[in-house]
Structure formats: structure tokens, C-alpha cells
Image (cartoon, grey):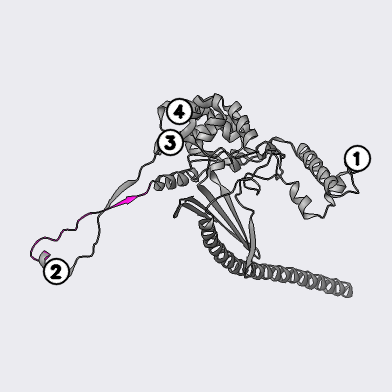
Amino acid sequence: MKTGLQKFDRANRRAVVLLITLVMLVVMATLAFIFTSRVATERYRNQYIVDYQIARYSCDSAAKYALATLEDINDLQLIARPNEPDFSDIFTLSRAEYREFVAAAAIEKIAAVDSNKTLDNVNDINDVENVENEEIADSIKIRGPYGAAWPLIVKPSEFEIGKAKVRIEIEDENAKYPLGWAVLGDKDVKRQARAGFETFCEWMDVNSVDIRLLKKQLKEIGEIKKFKMDFQPIKVTERGKQYIKKSERIKRRKGPSRLKPKTKTLSASVHRTTFAKLFHSSLLDIEPLTRTAIADENARQAAVKYMAMFGSDKVNINTAPRQVLESAFTFGGDADRIAEEIIQRRRIEPFVDMDDLKKKLMRYSDSIEKCEKYITTTSNFFTIRVTATSGVATASTVIAVIKGNKEIQRIATISN
């Protein structure tokens, strides 16, 4: 009997030892996993900090380079595109329609370049995708008014700074719908401005609920500051320490010391800086403007891509797409007809100035005169987008500038 109990106790002790051993192994494995995870997380965090510092330095350096490059661009050359579709109508195509259009354009180009292929036997999309000729590949891309894809004024620059890869894009802000128009303070054009904003949103498939919400938010911004088409420089009086000559200090010891107020004049661009801050603040929810019905690089792009949010006030008729042109000419009437005329004529030859526009579209001269302060034929408002990537970190900067004849005024800078 005792022998049986001894065997039973011995078996229980072994089971308990085995159970304790298993628990200890689980605990040790858990501690090892936690320790390894924390070490990996710390290592990743440290590596990210290093990578971000490299990316940020490269981004800031590239931004300075881009500003210097923009200063050297004295005359932006618009190109003629008589045999190409206008860039402003491409975004309305569905993905299938756009693909069909690109395939047809590529097939026609292949047939013209390669004598062994004709329009009859080059009808398979694989023939398009397997083309290695760079000229043909470039030709099937829809060119913008400057040759690069809209709204870029030049092709993006890509290079390396140390370990970071940098990309610079310079966009034409005068080719976009100025959001400032939606908060215009001029009572005489409020109705037209509201209609133009709704026209733009409807073109970009923004639903009626989101339009009402955006209008409410823009109204709140307008109560903070009204947008004007003729902002004036402002004078600011500052009171503070001033340098005083030694002889004057001796004289002032005999009487009370008084500092004269110092007055300085700020340029009109300070108003645009204010609106750039307001439009990028929490007062405006741009999420509805970032939605797109079709996720494609060239078709049905989001409304925010076509909207100028840095305080620009004019639209360049040579570079603006159809929906922006129609919104601009809402201030005068006949918007759709004028936009169509402009699109067809600028493909052959860009408009030189306002007189050239009135001459070529004489029958719409009354409507054009009403819109004259809202439109231009040359662009001077640009955004420089710089993106730098190093390892797992990415740094980006957007700089909005106004380019004058002799200098560049920086309006706003947004860094991420």
C-alpha cells in the first residue's frame, strides 16, 4: 500500500516540476520576446530619427535650390498642342476610356514610327505596353500647357543628396481655382462668386451635402477676414528698444526717457499669407475635396488638386482647365461658351494678353470685361513641392511664392 502511495506522490512531484518548468519557459520566452521587441522598436526609432534628419536636411537644401532655380526662370514658355487633346478634358474620362484613348494614341504613333506595323495590325494593347522607344512612351502622356503634366511648369527634378532621394515639383497656382473667391467681400459679386464655387464643385463631383458644409466653413473664415482683389500694403507701428546715439543718451539723462514708435510698411502679400494659414487650418475640412470616384493617376482626380489654397486671386486662361475657366467666367456670363473657345484657340496659339483675348473672342467682349480683374494670361503664383526620402523616413515641404520681375516673395511654407 505504501509503495503505491509513494509511486503516486513521486508521479505528482514530477508533474508539478514539469508544470513549473513549462511555466518558467513560457515566462522566459515572453520576457525574451518583450525584450527583443523593445530593442527592435528602440533601434527602429533611432534609425528613423537618423533617417528623418537626413531627409529633412536634404529637403531644406533642395528647397533652397528650387527657389534659386525659379529665380532663373525669366520667361515660362507655353507650347502649342494643335493635334493633341486638351489636358483639361482628360480628368472627365473613366479609367477604361482613358486607357482606350492612350492605347489609340500609342498605336497611331507606333504605326507612324515603325514601317513594319500599320494601324491594322497594331491593335493589341500588349503592343503598346511592350514599346521600348522613349519618344513613343512620352508621346502617349497628355502634355500640359508648358509641356510637363498639368499643373507642373517643368518636368519634376529627381536627384540624390547623400543617402536621400529628392523630388522637386513646381506647380502653377494661377492654373487652379482660387479658393479666396469663395470668401470675397465685394457684395456686388457675391452671387457670382457663390455660383462659380458651386460650378467648380459640381464639375469635381463634390456632393450637395459636402458643398453646403464647405460653404458654411468658408463663411466662418470670411467673417474672420474678407478676401479682396486689390489688397493694399499695411503699416505697422512697433514700440520697443531702439539704438540711441551716445550724445542723445547724455541729453536724455536730464529728462524723462521716451522711445519713438517705429513704423514699417508690409507688402500686400501679407494678406495672402493670412489666407494661406486660414485655408490650411482646422477651420476648413478639406476631406470632401480629397475624395475621388476613380483611383487613377490621370482620370477623375480629386478636387483639391485643382484648387489654389495659398491666397492667389487670378486664373491664367492659358493654363487653367475647363472647370476652372467656367468658374472664372461666371463673373461675366457665357462661361461655358467662352471656356470652349479659349480651349480650342490656346491649343494652336496661347493668348498674348487681354487685348488679344478680346480681339479673338470679340463677340464675348462684354462678358470678358466683367471678368478682366479675375483672369490673366501669365502666371506669377507658384508652389514648390519638395519631397526627400531616406530609409524609412520622408520629409516634405511646400513653399508658395509670388515671382516678380526682380524678386520672389515667399507667401507660406508648410513642412511635414
Assess disc 1: are there few (<14), some (14-19) or many (≥20) residues with their C-alpha within 10 Å of its C-alpha. Answer: few
Secondary structure under tag 2 reads helix
Vertical placement of residue 90 versus 68, above or below: above
Residue that label 2 marks: 247
**x and y, in percent, of residue 257 in the image:** 14, 61
- Mark 4 touching mark 2, by CB under 8 A? no
User: Which residue is denoted by mark 4 in the rendering?
Assistant: 190
Does label 3 or label 2 sit earlier along the sequence? 3
Find residue 264 and report its horizontal and vertical position in percent: 29, 52
Q: Which residue is mark 3?
A: 222
Which numbered disc flags the more N-terminal residue, 3 or 4?
4
Crowding at mark 3 (Cα within 10 Å: few <14, some 14-19, many 20+)? some
Residue 213 seen anywhere in this rendered image of the structure: no
Which quadrant: the C terminus? bottom right
Q: Main secondary structure of the magenta part?
A: loop
Rounded to the nearest angstrom, the CA distance separating label 4 from label 2 is 59 Å
Q: Which residue is mark 1?
A: 120
